[in-house]
Amino acid sequence: MRKFLVVLDDSKECLNAMRFAAMRAAKTGGGVQILSIIRPDDFNHWAGVGEIMREEARERIEVHFEVFAKWMRDKQGVNPELVIREGDPVPEIMAQIREDAEIGVLVLGAGTDNKGPGPLVTQLSRQSGSLPIPITIVPGDMSKERLEAIT
């Protein structure tokens, strides 16, 4: 089964990327894999404190994931899977793509402010020529109706 890989983070544009991935998966018989990345530099404390913070980060990710997963199951009939990795985002995204041969498309949301599309879109676009899969970049301010029309 072809999977749409989408990155779960705290950005507003993440919502449209999730919607797009779920709608495309539903219409094409594919799946959705949601990747969330915990940055290791967030835990440069004493070992015990760092471990507690890491566990709290995982719990926040799982709660956030469940919101998207419920919508995907209820509205799109897609049951997403969650993958949590630790490290820097771009290398971890690339590693996940290499490690899961079923991933067929990377879906990213583009930021809407004047700072540009966002760091992931910028960095991964530069590498797009050497990626083993295509990238779909979803505008962060695209309406739900427009997303439905194009998927």
Image: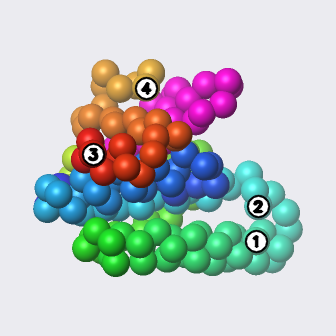
Q: Nearer the viewer, mark 1 or mark 4?
A: 4
| Image spot of residue 142 (x, y percent) | 46, 41
Residue at x-position 42% and y-position 51%: 144
Q: Is 141 situated above or below 127? A: below
User: Mark on residue 149?
Assistant: 3
Q: Quadrant of residue 134?
A: top left
Q: CA distance from mark 2 to mark 1?
A: 7 Å
> Is disc 4 placed on a helix, strand or loop?
helix
Whichever of labels 1 and 4 marks the residue nearer the N terminus, that label is: 1
Q: CA distance from mark 3 to mark 4?
A: 25 Å
Q: Nearer the viewer, mark 3 or mark 2?
A: 3
Q: Is 70 situated above or below 43? A: below
Disc 2 designates what residue?
43
Whichever of labels 2 and 1 marks the residue nearer the N terminus, that label is: 2
Circles 2 and 1 in contact, beta carbons < 8 Å: yes
- Residue 40 belongs to magenta span: no
Q: What amino acid type is highlighted by mark number 1?
A: Met
Q: Which residues are magenta?
A: 106-124
Q: CA distance from mark 3 to mark 1?
A: 41 Å
Q: What amino acid type is highlighted by mark number 4?
A: Ser
User: Mark on residue 125?
Assistant: 4
User: Mark on residue 2?
Assistant: none
Q: CA distance from mark 4 to mark 2?
A: 29 Å
Q: Is residue 148 left or right of residue 50?
A: left
Q: Nearer the viewer, mark 3 or mark 1?
A: 3
Circles 3 and 4 in contact, beta carbons < 8 Å: no
- Residue 112 belongs to magenta span: yes
